[in-house]
Image (spheres, rainbow, N blue to C red):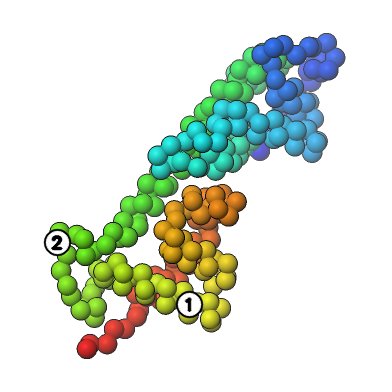
Amino acid sequence: MKTITKTKLAASPEAGYSRTNTTTPLAFAWVAYCEHPEDLETKEKLAWELDQALIDVLPNRRCNGILAGSENEVRQAAILLLLDRYLAGNVGLIAATKELDLQQIENQIQRSIIAAIRTSTRTLLHSIEKDIQKHAYCESIDEHPAATCVHPAERKTLWELPYELQRELMFVALRIALKEKLLPQHNVRMVMTMMDESLSQSAMAESMGISRSAVHQRLAPVREYLRNSIETQEFPLK
């Protein structure tokens, strides 16, 4: 988080300011943090209140389409943006903090929350779309109108082979990785499960109780291994 210049406030929220119907503990947590920016407890309290506010703005099952089930990942990215720069860079929030205007503090924090969610959503959407385009080869070549039958040895890349053959080659490579301990066992078994059950990264993340980004990170070394292992595979001419 960027360092907030400590401003001596006229009074603390507990001394002279009562909560209104539209002011939540979030405003008080922010004021407390600004008064004691180096205090670990105030930082944790602010982070907790931000997390609750993010859940209110973006509850589970709110996203749809290819972002369905990604609410927690969006919120995690948003809170990092808020703590890193969105709050410290909100001129209106800083001005309201100096005046100890709790209602305006609340309003400005909510504006920053919405901006952080929008940015996080766009970033995640772009990442997923890019990932989909990168892995468009998963379509079965046999079903493509221009598909032709060629010997595996005549291929230029693995992805010119029929989908079922691609799949079998990947399973063989993964079993070798398990046997020879070339990759972490839990990463390999996760990929095999995804292939067996045709699970998306989001679905796999939900079943494992982790974030989609965590699944993506576990996939990275497996992808690299498969790329290097299978592309160098020799096929006998029979």
Residue 212 vertical position relative to residue 4 in the rendered view, above or below: below
**Callout 1 secondary element:** helix
Res. 77 visible in picture: no
Under circle 2, the secondary element is: loop
Residue 25 seen in the figure: yes
Query: Around disc 2, counting alpha carbons within 10 Å, would you say few (fewer than 14), some (14 to 19), or many (20 or more)?
Result: few
> What type is the residue that disc 1 sits on?
Arg
In the picture, the quarter occupied by the C terminus is bottom left
Q: Is residue 116 left or right of residue 38?
A: left
Give the image location of residue 150, x and y in percent: 18, 75
Instruction: Verify CB contact (< 8 Å) between mark 2 and mark 1.
Output: no
The quadrant holding residue 77 is: top right
Crowd class of label 1 (few under 14; some 14 to 19; many from 20; radius 10 Å)? some
Residue at left 75%, top 29%? 33
Dot label at residue 175: 1
| Depth check, front residue: 208 or 93 | 208
Task: Give how far across and how far down residue 234 sits, in percent.
Answer: 31, 83
Q: Is residue 156 left or right of residue 184?
A: left
Q: Is residue 20 above or below residue 161?
A: above
Q: Which residue is rendered at x = 42% and y = 47% of the image?
A: 127
Relative to 116, say whether 128 is above or below: below
| Residue at figure coordinates x 70%, y 24% from the top left | 26
Spot occupied by residue 20 in the image (x, y as percentages of width and height)? 72, 11
> Quadrant location of the N terminus?
top right
Q: Measuring 48% from the left and 49% from the top, which residue is drawn there?
A: 202
Q: Based on the displayed image, in which of its 4 quarters is residue 24 positioned?
A: top right
Q: Earlier in the sequence, mark 2 or mark 1?
A: 2
Q: Amino acid at mark 2?
A: Ala
Where, by quadrant of the figure, is residue 28 drawn? top right
Residue, disc 2: 146
